[in-house]
Image (cartoon, rainbow, N blue to C red):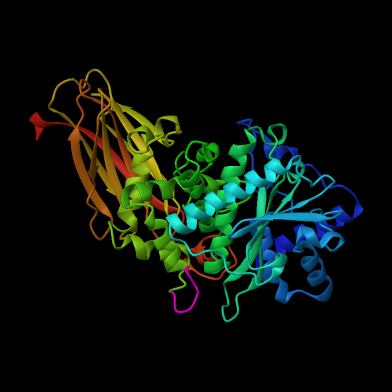
Amino acid sequence: MSFPARVAVACLLAGVLTALGGPADAHSDAHSDDPSGGPRERHAAGTPYSTLAMRDLFVARPTLGPLESMLVSALMARPTDGNQDPGGDGYRGPARKLCGQRICVHHAVRGADAPSTRRWVRRTLRVLGNVWDHEVDGLRFRPPPSDGRRGGDDRFDVYLADLGDRGLFGYCTPERRVRGERRAASSYCVLDDDFSRQQFGARPIESLRVTAAHEFFHAIQFGYDFREDPWLLESTATWIEEAFADRVDDNRRYLRFGTVRRPGIALDDFANDRYAHYGNWAWWEYLTDQYGDGLVRSVWNQADTVGDAPGRSSVKAMKAVLDRHAGLPRTLTSYAVANLSPADTYAEGGRWPAARVDRRATLDRSRRSATDRVRIDHLAARHVAYAPTRDLRGDRWRLRVSVDAPRRRAEARVVVVRTDGRRTRNAVRLDRRGDGSLTVGFDTRDVARVVVTLVNTSTRYRCHEGTLFACGGEPRDDDARFRVRATVIHRSSH
């Protein structure tokens, strides 16, 4: 059993025992908007009821012993299974459903899980229908695999339950493998029964829209490859919130945890206590701005395992698609540079955080050079900035930037930020050894600062090592050494 699956089983045991003994903890910290705390998590830490925890349990179930397997089956039961679902979501009385052409919404008639009005059930069904129209008919993803007659017929099933008291917006559960396919599964979803402002801190319809888009996309993903890398599952599901409900902007809260604000984090980072995988929806926003909404589908087509599809792990799938364009190294570098000034790149970037600059130095006639050494993990970047002082006045002052980087697995860019706010971007051509240099203007009348962006573009892994990175692998080129030397020169002396 993989390490993530063992963690999920441990959460399962704790969650089920808590549910059997009394009410679960409310996970009130999961709804904090305090910048000093965590974001309002869509999947609260500490509860087994999160989409990826349920996915890991589904993956692990064939390897478990009888008792563990029984507990997993109980936890994965549908709310309408009542007492057979001891984890907290089983309805304690009769249930009804309201169906459209493709989706059925199930709800309790009474008790804590019952929605306050029938109108909310109709609204939920309508929003889910709009989500299907957008994600399946519009973006042309495959619909979730049929569950046969589970839930009454072959329509996709969504259940309403009081999840807010446990810090959850919603979750989806893979349920049965598609016949003849090893890594595709049918599923069902559970959403909160009212998304009350008191619990979720936003208008109920807004919370419903982003959660429905996010969780239904997980159901779609499970029909491609339910074992796909977790960062790809979550980052694309968070991106699709923006594509479906652009004006809600709930996902903006995660940007400060991802590679927009923290470029030194690996693009495929996943951890329940760091949230980068949610914040990295911006990567897909950048790519679709460049190449169109179909790019995300193209990546999932490369990750697809159904039939004779390629079945690539996340980074390989992404690389295969970007090789048709500018390539992953160049695109990742352009993304890192764009995040220095999001307002210049993204439609809503004026309200985004900007990338953190790791090192800053001021250069003048007496201090004409500075050398910075940084270490960068795979698929991550660092920024180093140099500013001229007033005594570097005149168009003969220049700045020579010399870069020493790992060979064949690095990129470097130099951005000249002018005093009027304009920016010019220049690629540093690195030779086979990873060395390169570039000279730019450094006149204090025109130049506010020069920013050097260094990127570790490595996509090399030792796969199947039980990690949460791409292909479950150990990155082979983390902590790579980069050196940049900035030297002020005067053209009259050369």
Residue 25 image offset from top left, x and y in percent? 81, 44
Residue ranking furthest to the bottom: 180
Residue 405 image offset from top left, x and y in percent? 32, 52
Residue ranking furthest to the right: 21
**293 sits left or right of 156 in the view:** left
Residue 78 image offset from top left, x and y in percent? 75, 61
What residue is shown at x 64% (from left), y 39% (from top)? 40
Residue 171 vs 438, above or below: the answer is below
What residue is shown at x 43% (from left), y 56% (from top)? 139
Magenta region's main secondary structure?
A: loop
The mark total stands at: 0
The residue stretch that appears in magenta: 304-309
Of 465 and 120, the residue lying toward us: 120
Task: Tell me which corner region of the image, top left, top right, bottom left or bottom right, holds residue 372.
Answer: top left
Residue 306 in sight from this viewpoint: yes
Would you say residue 163 sits in the magenta stretch?
A: no
Task: Tell me which corner region of the image, top left, top right, bottom left or bottom right, holds residue 312.
Answer: bottom left
**306 sits left or right of 483 in the view:** right
Residue 454 vs 460, above or below: the answer is above
What residue is shown at x 37% (from left), y 44% (from top)? 336
Residue 85 vs 449, above or below: the answer is below
What residue is shown at x 9% (from left), y 35% (from top)? 494
**338 sits left or right of 109 in the view:** left
Quarter containing the N terminus: bottom right
Residue 288 image offset from top left, x and y in percent? 37, 50
Residue 473 vs 21, above or below: the answer is below
Of 107 and 274, the residue lying toward us: 107
Residue 42 in sight from this viewpoint: no
**279 sits left or right of 3 in the view:** left
